[in-house]
């Protein structure tokens, strides 16, 4: 069996590694445009922020390791077209410009996503950066000591993480967000406001409901300021982080897709084209409560990659179904941390559910242990059955890991009434006799 994987980062390499272990007789080939594989871009804000300096920490596997395991790697090859009738992949060798055609029996598409770059005047300047590729971020890291004023465009995960890390280095940071709140995807407004306050405590100047209009250049072609519809901000560097677009433009017409071009897959990772699978940031994710969703996170990419790695290498009767995601995510913002899992109130309302919410502040552990802090917890649940739909948390130490228990409860379909009496571990440094999760659940009426 010829198994071909297009894309060698998270989902792609998870698929290749699992497929090679599952079917020893299969010939597994990975085609990757870059000269590296298994790169974890999630580490880039923290690499830029000086939390670590060894770039190898962001690479889970080396090409040599994968080739030793029997996987064929075609690095620096870019796929230009796929013929799904003849089952052939056409690609260009980026080093030689030679055209190469590869036959497959089963194909996996893991082409990822690319950052959305707005068509602003000056956007091509050398001191404008996106935070997706190592080379780009490494270039900024080498210059960071000479940079003072930084404008970050976009208040999502990457924008907030990068702004936070740069503020810790004493940079003067302006964060521009066109929406009414930062982090509006995974969090409801009251949590977005808490996160904004957290990064403002670090000195970051947040500008919401403000749109970047133009990047002002000097006579050498470098950006010196960012003009918005409300102001003008000096900039030695500009970071653009306004979202992602699936890398499917060259094939999206062949598949059932979401409106943004993400390839729709089923619970087995199969696309609408026979013998073709997909996963990662180029594809949809089966959400347990929302159905087909776009969730460009490393967690789902790796899990679905592993699922596809099994299914692409076996008969249909032996395929494994993905259990479904809940969009669980977390972020560190200044001295605080936050997490979201399952449905937000916005999502529950948009879905037309008969829901209720409760939102409380309670203590992380007993008052006679010195690091006691408040945790804010919001639960979204069914108004009649009390089945838990979603949860959000905000606080300092010991906050985000509590989302693990709440995710498990949502996944299992537990009610708030059950959750209020689950026997969580207790000791004064870690919890109260009534764990914070118990307390929140018991306020659901």
Image: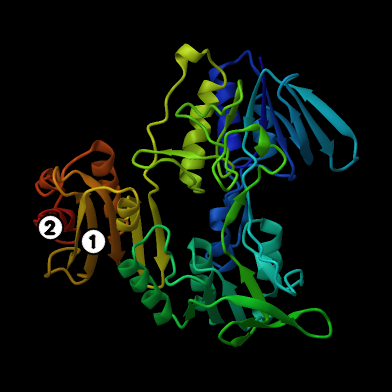
Secondary structure beneath label 2: helix
* Quadrant containing the N terminus in the rendered view: top right
The quadrant of the image that shows the C terminus is bottom left
Write down the quadrant of residue 368 in the picture.
Answer: bottom left
Q: Is residue 384 above or below residue 215?
A: above
- Decide: few, some or many residues near mark 1? Use Cα within 10 Å; few <14, some 14-19, many ≥20: many
Left or right of residue 99, residue 195 in this image = left
Q: Position of residue 441 (x, y in %)?
A: 14, 53
Residue 222, image x, y percentages: 77, 79
Label 2 Cα neighbours within 10 Å, binned few <14 / some 14-19 / many ≥20: many
Picture residue at 60% right of the left edge, 35% below the top? 13
Q: Quadrant of residue 55?
A: bottom right
Q: How is the rendered protein coloured?
A: rainbow
Kindly identify the residue that appears in the image at 51 percent across and 23 percent down: 310
Q: Is residue 81 left or right of residue 234?
A: right
Place of residue 166 in the rendered image (x, y in percent of width and height, measured from the top left):
54, 74
Q: Which residue is mark 2?
A: 439
1 and 2 marks in contact (CB < 8 Å): yes
* Camera-side residue of 77 and 193: 193
N-term mark: 1 or 2: 1
Element assignment for label 1: strand
Residue 52 in view: no
Whether 374 is drawn above or below 102: the answer is below
Label annotation for residue 377: 1
Residue at the far front: name it: 352
Give whichever of 118, 407 is nearer the camera: 118
Percent coordinates x, y for residue 271 in the rendering: 56, 29
Distance, label 1 to label 2, CA atoms, is 9 Å
Write the residue at 60% across / 29% down. Answer: 16
Please determine whether, in this image, residue 234 is positioned above or below residue 269: below
Q: Is residue 265 above or below residue 383?
A: above
**Which numbered tag is attached to residue 245?**
none
């Amino acid at each position: 069996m010829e198994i071909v994987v297009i894309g060698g980062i998270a989902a792609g390499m998870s698929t290749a590694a699992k497929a090679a272990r599952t079917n020893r007789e299969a010939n597994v080939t990975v085609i990757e445009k870059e000269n590296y594989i298994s790169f974890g871009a999630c580490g880039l804000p923290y690499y830029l922020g000086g939390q670590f300096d060894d770039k190898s920490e962001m690479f889970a596997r080396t090409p040599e390791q994968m080739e030793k395991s029997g996987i064929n790697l075609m690095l620096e090859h870019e796929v230009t077209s796929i013929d799904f009738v003849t089952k052939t992949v056409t690609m260009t060798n980026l080093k030689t410009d030679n055209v190469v055609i590869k036959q497959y029996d089963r194909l996996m598409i893991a082409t990822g996503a690319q950052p959305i770059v707005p068509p602003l005047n000056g956007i091509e300047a050398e001191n404008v950066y996106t935070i997706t590729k190592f080379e780009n971020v490494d270039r900024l890291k080498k210059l960071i000591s000479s940079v003072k004023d930084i404008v970050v465009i976009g208040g999502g995960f990457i924008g907030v993480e990068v702004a936070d890390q740069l503020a810790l280095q004493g940079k003067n940071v302006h964060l521009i967000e066109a929406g009414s709140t930062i982090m509006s995807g995974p969090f409801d407004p009251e949590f977005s406001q808490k996160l904004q306050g957290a990064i403002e405590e670090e000195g970051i100047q947040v500008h919401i409901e403000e749109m970047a209009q133009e990047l002002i250049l000097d006579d050498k072609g470098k950006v010196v300021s960012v003009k918005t519809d409300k102001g003008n901000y000096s900039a030695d560097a500009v970071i653009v982080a306004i979202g992602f677009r699936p890398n499917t433009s060259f094939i999206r017409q062949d598949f059932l897709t979401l409106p943004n071009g993400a390839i729709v897959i089923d619970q087995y990772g199969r696309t609408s084209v026979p013998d073709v699978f997909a996963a990662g940031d180029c594809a949809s994710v089966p959400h347990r409560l929302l159905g087909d969703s776009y969730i460009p996170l490393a967690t789902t990419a790796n899990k679905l990659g592993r699922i596809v790695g099994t299914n692409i290498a076996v008969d249909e009767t032996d395929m494994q179904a993905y259990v479904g995601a809940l969009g669980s995510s977390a972020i560190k913002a200044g001295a605080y941390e936050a997490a979201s899992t399952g449905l937000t109130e916005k999502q529950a309302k948009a879905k037309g559910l008969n829901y209720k919410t409760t939102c409380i502040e309670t203590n992380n552990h007993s008052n006679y242990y010195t690091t006691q802090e408040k945790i804010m917890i919001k639960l979204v649940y069914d108004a009649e059955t009390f089945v838990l739909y979603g949860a959000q948390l905000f606080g300092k130490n010991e906050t985000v890991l509590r989302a693990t228990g709440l995710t498990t409860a949502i996944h299992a379909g537990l009610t708030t009434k059950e959750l209020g009496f689950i026997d969580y571990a207790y000791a004064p440094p870690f919890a109260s006799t009534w764990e914070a999760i118990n307390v929140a659940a018991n306020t659901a009426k």
